[in-house]
Amino acid sequence: MPMRAPSPTKFLRLIELLYLILIVLSFYLLFLSRTGEAHTVWEVLHPAFIPVFFIVTSLLVAILATSEKASYKLLLVIVHSILVHSLLSIIFPVGDLSGQQMVLGRTRLVYENAVLHGWPPWQVETVQSQIYQFFRGENFQAALSVVISRMCGVDILEIHLFLVPVLWGVFSPIAAYLTAHTLTKNEKLAVMSSLIISAFPYTIYFGAISVPNSLGFIFFFYALYFMLKNLESNDSKSKFLMLAFSFISLLSHYLTGIMSLSLLILFLAFKSYRSEKSPSSTAKASLLISFAFCSSLLPLSLIYLRFFRSGTFTAFTLDKLCQLPLEESVGLFFLGQLIYGFDLKTVFLVVVGPTVALIYLAHILYRSRSRKILSKAQISFLFAAFLLMLVDYRILKLLMEGLPLNEERLWVFRDFIAAPFVTLAIFGTCSSIHSVLKARSSPTVSSGSLKSLSKSNAIRVSTLLLVINIVTSMVLAGWITFSLTAAYPQVGPLQTTWYELEAVRYIEETTDEKYVVIGDIWTIFAGEVIVGIYNPRAYYFVEYDTRGITLFNKMREEPSPEVMIEAMNQTGTDTTVAYFIVTEPRLGTDEFNRVVSLTLENEQLRSEAVFIFGDGKLYVFSYRKQQGV
Amino acid sequence: MQLSKLETLIAQDSKLLFTLTSYVLIFMIYANVSILQSSILGIVASSLYVLINATFLGHAFFGKEAAFFRFMLGLLSLVMLIGFVAWLALIIQNLNVTWFTLVLFVVATLSSLLNRRMKDRNANESAKPN
């Protein structure tokens, strides 16, 4: 019986099936890597994960190059994107240490109904502080997480952990697609752009942690898209959506809100400039002034943040420029601070994509002088927005001090704009290679006309085309895999351990009275994710509260019931039980042994219950307040 | 094909059938949070609630987009709306079970109203003589 060759659709379905199987395998490998005691994901990541991820990404690039429906391709990109952003949430039991745990600590207050009469639950001194408290991003995220958690009947911890990885994984590829599609009207290029967004380490990292800023980035991306859309169509719906997304990005985080506002003003300046048929020199000058004003909005707002938030001391300075050697200033000017122990390879990854995008943007605009191009207004606006990010980053980096956030966060905005242009550059390069091939292999290289070539020529040209397609897939997949390895920190503190969580949970489940816990900052992080911060029933001091630090140091030096009673009295409620937690990996073996033996020497503390977790790595000492104390 | 029919059916919302379904689902979610506390029931009821209201918002704001983008952008708008209304509830009072239920109710009502308003507007536009 003669064998029939499978149709291209069947072959494509087979490739898609293989892709989905490998994606499931990748998630499974992440679950296998799950651990309760590690510093970074790289310590415990299954050795097969990266090779499988590379193959998965290569397959995805190959699928994106086919004529499959754009919505199917986007679904595949979304699954890939969720995988890219889920490493921290799947591998560590309570996600990345610090930032997102602090947010969860405050979200728990809302979830556990510890907030009863509006936010904030504590006394606020000034009207400005009250306004700041209303608009801080944590409120919006807390509200969203609590509603989703209650709707699904799932604990707030799981919802919080996966909130940003899932929202980012789903919505940032769509935003990248829509942006690129608005600019080019090319579906294939737009879908590729939705994948290229995962080739920037900073966007991967911010999409992996559930903090308000990450949520704000997502809404900012859509605000930007609707600005482009409005430049194209000028309809009232896109105007409303542009304003709505900008407002929600402000509710999510002030950084994304201010950047949205800057771009909104720039957008208005662009619209007014475009409305003139032949712009006068005054119009050009006013566009430049608007650009300067928009660039200054972020630095100035960070300065004036002090009126709303106490403890902010941001100021302009020339000290950095004066004190640094010339080469370091130049390095900072071009690359920025190399955080997380970034090496040269990572610098290459962080800088090369946006540089390609900037060069390509400039190239398109230069070309547009001599011939008409599609979406010139949008491209000019994005070029100005890109420059605005670069200018703001340099101002924050070199001319300001005491910033409440690190300047590298601006890279995420920059990468959002860069993604479609990097894709355009890749497509441009590929089509140039195809043109060269066309010129050298007469008459043409299209598969239909291969039949007209001699057998040896047809084989040669087919092989060349195949090699180009495979190489392109592998280079892109390699780039994304490499970005993934650069995105997640290579060094870091010990993440919240299983025994810290077990101890905190045990205390919560077995204590009926109101209690307070004295511990180091790591214990506080563990407490935050289980019971929240400043919870009147289960009290953990907030991370920066000096009272908590002082009490812990007192207990380390001279453990006594008096310190425990002092802690109980500082909670502001009728707390009757206090716990003191020490952990070996946090204190170091010698110090841990010293503190444990010193505490056990105290007769009153020894006579109370002592709990041991993690095979002796964690001790919990307790003290119950006596009547009349 | 079946999915697009379902989408049209929801967006038409004849006799407010899907708006009322949304309210029934809110009651189920409320009962689940207060008494049953089942994740399965919660996820099923919430998924249906999200499906209905994301379709409403998708039709209201993104009627001209392709079906996939209409639903996904509707979903994002729903996330935004839930977040915004819940944020208001939080800063005014709190997000206990009663206020949470109120948030879902407000979001469902707003989505339904927006859907109906846009439907009427689109109908008026198509009825206009060329």
Image (tube, helix red, strand yellow):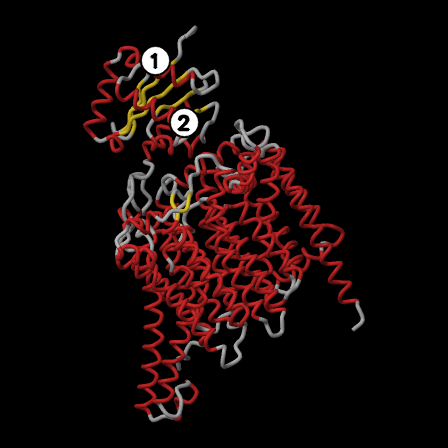
10 Å crowding of disc 1: few (<14), some (14-19), many (20+): few
Q: Percent position (x, y) of residue B50?
A: 59, 49
Which of B8/A126 is in front? A126
The residue tagged 2 is A541
Question: Is residue B63 positioned above or below A401 on the image?
Answer: below
Callout 1 secondary element:
helix
How many numbered marks have been drawn onto this rendered protein structure?
A: 2
Q: Is residue A80 toward the left or the right of residue B67 in the image?
A: left
Which of A371/A325 is in front? A325
Question: Which residue extends farthest left?
Answer: A590
Q: Residue at x 66, y 58 (%)?
A: B59
Q: Is residue B90 toward the left or the right of residue A619 in the image?
A: right
Residue B6 is at least partly visible in this image: no
Callout 2 secondary element:
loop
The subunit letter for the residue under badge 1 reads A
- In the image, what residue type sits under mark 1? Glu
Q: Percent position (x, y) of residue A86?
A: 40, 50
The residue tagged 1 is A562
- In the image, what residue type sits under mark 2? Phe
Q: Residue at x 42, y 44 (%)?
A: A315
Q: Quadrant of the C terminus of chain A?
A: top left
Q: Quadrant of the N terminus of chain A?
A: bottom left
